[in-house]
Amino acid sequence: MERWVYGALWLLFAGSFLLQLARSGLRPTRALLLLLRLGLLGLLLCLCQACLPWPLGAPLATAACLALGCQTQPRRLPVAGKAVFITGCDSGFGKQAAHHLDALGFTVFASVLDLQGAGARELRQSCSPRLTLLQMDLTKPDDIRRAQQLVAPQTVGTGLWGLVNNAGFDDTIADAELSPLCKFRTCMDINFFGTLELTKALLPQLRAARGRIVTVSSPAGDMPYPCLAAYGASKAALTLLMDTFRNELKPWGVKVSVILPGYFKTGISCNPAYWQEKKEQLLASLPAALLQDYGEEYIHEIHKQFVQFMKLANEDLSLVVNSITDALVSARPAPRYYPGQGVWLMYFIHHYLPRAVRDLCLKAFFINQTLPRALQHQPHNGLKPQ
């Protein structure tokens, strides 16, 4: 009887802690604390089993396990009087975050590309008068300057509590060699340089509030996803920039977090017709010799696989919005958040498994390119037959 009782306790509490560990969002500190608590529980159960009769030891161990295992809610900061600036609110994460943060009581500055667009109209209708919409293109320094001039006088007494760098861009799904150089520049201009310029423009207000910088990056900036070279390179630069800001702004009391979401359905990026148009534009722009080497069928196959992958995208944007919110209101925000199914698994594979396994998994989960036309009739070592 005693063995069954303590065995059941072991399974119950070990399973509970392993579940909490899986949900820890890849936060090393939290994961370590969970493991330490599990170790203490194991020691406590062993002591109770060895030193006490089970009718006394089992209830005592259960009470102690419940006390150690209970989840304490992280302390949340008040939002009254705090202002946040969010980019890319026409659709997707930005629009939903603007709506959610407004509902929580923040004063929200939401930037959009089109003040007359559907996203802007929806925010006007559904949000409180505290929300201010402004038109801003991150590639235009004048727009960024106007945004700073709008925010500064309205945050003189309090400073700007939060900047949510959400706006991003990608319109090319192709090998790096097939991606026009202008696409690399556009991704860098929006995803990196525009975000950098806006962040620097608003830093005086953020430092005055000892506030938060929350940036939506991408796992494609950490892992070499096939056919995302332009987008991934810009996000890699962005993530490193934010890690640098995190260290440099500590003396000012500014906390910096990066959101690394899985694949979600956000606006036009999940519209197959949009990607069909981009594929046709890519085919028309490629030099004849390069197109001959790879073959049109190679690009068609990449596009087909990507469209299939899009069908798996998560429609529940609240996972990302909750991460953004936690980074803004938690007393101890995480440096990184990983919302989305399977993201933690991909990072585990990337960090701990051999490179060959990592590459195979990326192709299996995303895009597995076929052999280019010029290589289809050659030996696999790439050498021409004599």
Image (cartoon, helix red, strand yellow):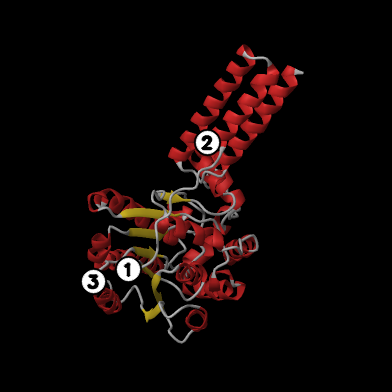
Apparent side of residue 305 relative to residue 292 in the rendered image (left or right): right
Nearest-to-viewer mark from 2 and 1: 1
Nearest-to-viewer mark from 3 and 2: 3
Q: Which residue position holds label 1?
A: 194
Type of residue at label 2? Leu
User: Mark 1, residues whose alpha carbon is within 10 Å: few (<14), some, or many (≥20)?
Assistant: many
Residue reaching furthest to the right = 1
Type of residue at label 1? Gly
Q: Quadrant of the N terminus?
A: top right
Q: Which residue position holds label 2?
A: 353
Q: Residue at x 59, y 34 (%)?
A: 66
Residue at mark 3 to residue at mark 1: CA–CA distance: 24 Å
Q: Position of residue 109 (x, y in %)?
A: 37, 74
Residue at mark 3 to residue at mark 2: CA–CA distance: 50 Å
Residue 156, which numbered label?
3
Q: Is residue 254 above or below residue 281?
A: above
- Between 301 and 202, the residue placed more toward the observer is 202
The local secondary structure at tag 2 comes to loop
- Between 260 and 174, the residue placed more toward the observer is 260
Type of residue at label 3? Val
Q: Position of residue 298 (x, y in %)?
A: 58, 61
Q: Is residue 248 visible?
A: yes
Say whether disc 3 or disc 2 marks the residue closer to the N-terminus. Answer: 3
The local secondary structure at tag 3 comes to loop
Nearest-to-viewer mark from 3 and 1: 3
Q: Residue at x 47, y 63 (%)?
A: 178
Q: Position of residue 262 (x, y in %)?
A: 54, 56
Q: Position of residue 341 (x, y in %)?
A: 59, 52
Q: Is residue 138 above or below residue 62?
A: below
Q: Residue at x 38, y 54 (%)?
A: 257
